[in-house]
Image: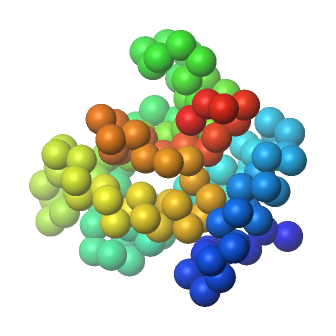
């Protein structure tokens, strides 16, 4: 069983990552969907709103993008109805994403959330 977050146990992230690594693609896709649901709830509980960007794409991303295998999503963040496009507003949400076992943030693409699969994020 994968823990919900790593807030209380420093070794939990490693456990989550090891468990994710042992999953096949379909299992990761299901776990990823659950992670995204938790993230969106956290975003709303933090006083922000979100719209969904690319979650499953066929084109428009780098070669071998996790968007093409349903393991990445772009989220558009809003506060008081204003679109926050600088990216830095996503930092607190990436910290939460990290606690769920998400892939490391991509500094030039901060609205991107994914899980690693075969070395890709």
Q: How is the image coloured?
A: rainbow
For the point 56% across and 35% down, the residue is 121
Q: Residue 48: x percent and y percent?
A: 28, 67
Q: Residue 114: x percent and y percent?
A: 55, 43
For the residue pair 83 and 71, the one nearer the viewer reads as: 71
Report the side of 81 relative to 17 (left or right): left
Q: Residue 120: x percent and y percent?
A: 61, 30
Residue 56: in sight, yes or no?
Answer: no
- Residue 87 position (above or below residue 44): above
Report the side of 101 relative to 44 (left or right): right
- Residue 55 position (above or below residue 41): above
For the point 71% across and 56% down, the residue is 17
Q: Residue 9: x percent and y percent?
A: 65, 82
- Name the image quarter holding residue 108: top left
For the point 16% across and 59% down, the residue is 81
Residue 90: in sight, yes or no?
Answer: yes
For the point 70% across and 63% down, the residue is 14
Quadrant (top left/top right/bottom left/bottom right) for the N terminus: bottom right
- Residue 66 position (above or below residue 59): below
- Residue 15 position (above or below residue 121): below
For the residue pair 20 and 55, the one nearer the viewer reads as: 20
């Amino acid at each position: 069983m994968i823990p919900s977050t790593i807030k209380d146990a420093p070794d939990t992230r490693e456990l989550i990552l090891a468990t994710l690594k042992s999953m096949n693609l379909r299992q990761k896709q299901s776990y990823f969907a659950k992670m995204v649901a938790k993230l969106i709830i956290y975003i709303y509980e933090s006083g922000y709103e979100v719209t969904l960007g690319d979650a499953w794409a066929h084109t428009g991303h780098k070669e071998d993008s996790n968007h093409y295998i349903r393991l990445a999503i772009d989220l558009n963040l809003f506060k008081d109805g204003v679109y926050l496009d600088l990216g830095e507003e996503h930092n607190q949400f990436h910290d939460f994403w990290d606690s769920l076992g998400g892939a490391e943030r991509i500094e030039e693409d901060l609205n991107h959330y994914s899980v690693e699969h075969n070395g890709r994020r």
